[in-house]
Image (spheres, rainbow, N blue to C red):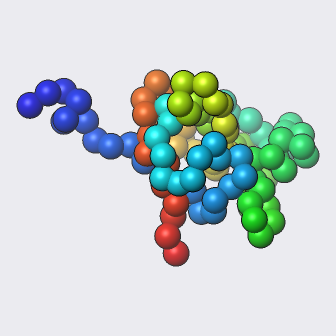
Amino acid sequence: MSKSSKEKTLTIKFSHDYYKLPARLPFKAKLIQLIQFDKALLSKEFIEYDTKYKDGNYPLPNGMLLILVFLFDDSIIFTTIRRSNYSKFSYYQNNVGKTFECIELKP
């Protein structure tokens, strides 16, 4: 069995079909950077870009957040903001450079 067939498929779930996404879900993208940030330091424009979907904007919690930077189709960068805690930071940090299946979270 090859190494790639033993690797677990990494997934990241999106609760909505956000305008920022470069393609219709599902699709694959490579995680290329992880940034930890306090929400208070993010511009209103960046929050608007990252959280906007058809019915409004997803509300972000206050405090520390993770910004995940993905590369789609070797040329399109997009981000997603996630809550930050030690386990999430560690998980994403250990998977920088790997490809994720981007899927829609079904209610």
Vertical comparison of 96 with 52: above or below: above
Q: Residue furthest bottom?
A: 107
Residue 24 drawn at (x, y percent)? 57, 53
Looking at the image, residue 19 lies above or below residue 74: below
Q: From the top left corner, tell me how far across and down residue 42 is, in percent.
A: 84, 39
Q: Is residue 34 visible?
A: no
Nearer the observer, 3 or 25: 25
**Looking at the image, which residue sits at the far left?**
1
Task: State how many labels appear.
Answer: 0
Which residue is at the front of the view, 5 or 38?
5
- State the residue at coordinates (68%, 55%): 18
Residue 98 occupies which quadrant of the picture?
Answer: top left
Residue 73 shows in the view: yes
Give the residue at x 19% y 35%: 5
Location of the N terminus (image quadrant): top left
Residue drawn at point x = 52 percent, y = 43 percent: 88
Q: Residue furthest right?
A: 44
Q: Position of residue 46 (x, y in %)?
A: 83, 41
6 relative to 80, above or below: above
Q: Position of residue 87 (x, y in %)?
A: 48, 43
Q: Quadrant of residue 15?
A: bottom right
Q: Residue at x 62, y 36 (%)?
A: 68
